[in-house]
Amino acid sequence: MKISELIICITIFCLITIVCLETYTSFERNYKNTEEIIYTSEHVIEFDYKLRTYIDNIHVPYWKNKKNIYEIEKEKIFDMGVNYDCKILSVSPIVDNEEEIIGLSVLWRYKEKEIETRERF
């Protein structure tokens, strides 16, 4: 009876050890992936915030030609992507029912992910 109890205890100890090691290995693997995803998300959110803030600060008086201002701001937005490791793919106007430009839509890429930011003036 003593030997059988010893064998059962050793078996249980080995199983618990294997489960703990597998859990630790899985944790380490997923922790590195999670850390990378958090880093990427921070950069995406930061650049999106910069774009939205920039577009929101564009003030277009009603007497000025909005298409000219759109063309000027479009070039400035394309230059913004260089500082943040982001590639601006396109900038297009957002128009209302009366065909007036009321905002900008920016399509950009960070790593393999394409993101669209839409903001009104």
Image: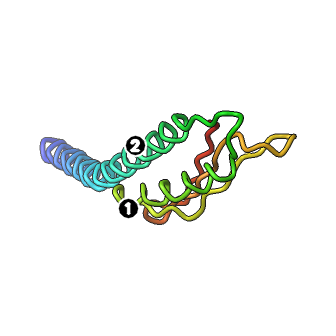
Hey, what amino acid is under mark 2? Glu
Q: Residues within 10 Å of mark 1 (few under 14, many from 20)?
A: few
Q: Is residue 95 left or right of residue 112?
A: right
Residue corresponding to mark 2? 46
Q: In the visual, does 96 lie left or right of 81? A: right
What is the image's colouring?
A: rainbow
Q: Amino acid at mark 1?
A: Val
Q: Nearer the viewer, residue 69 or 107?
A: 69
Choose between 2 and 65: the one closer to the eye: 65
Q: Which residue is mark 1?
A: 82
Q: Is residue 50 above or below residue 86?
A: above
> Which residue is at a point 68% across and 46% down the rendered structure image?
66
**Could you tell me which quadrant the C terminus lies in?**
top right
Q: CA distance from mark 2 to mark 1?
A: 14 Å
Quadrant where the N terminus is found in the figure: top left
Q: Position of residue 19 (x, y in %)?
A: 28, 49
Q: Is 53 positioned to the left or the right of 100 in the image? A: left
| SS for callout 2 | helix
Mark carried by residue 51: none
- Residue at the extreme right of the image, as rendered: 97
Q: Quadrant of residue 64?
A: top right
Quarter holding residue 86: bottom left
Q: Residue at x 63, y 47 (%)?
A: 104
Q: Secondary structure at mark 1?
A: helix
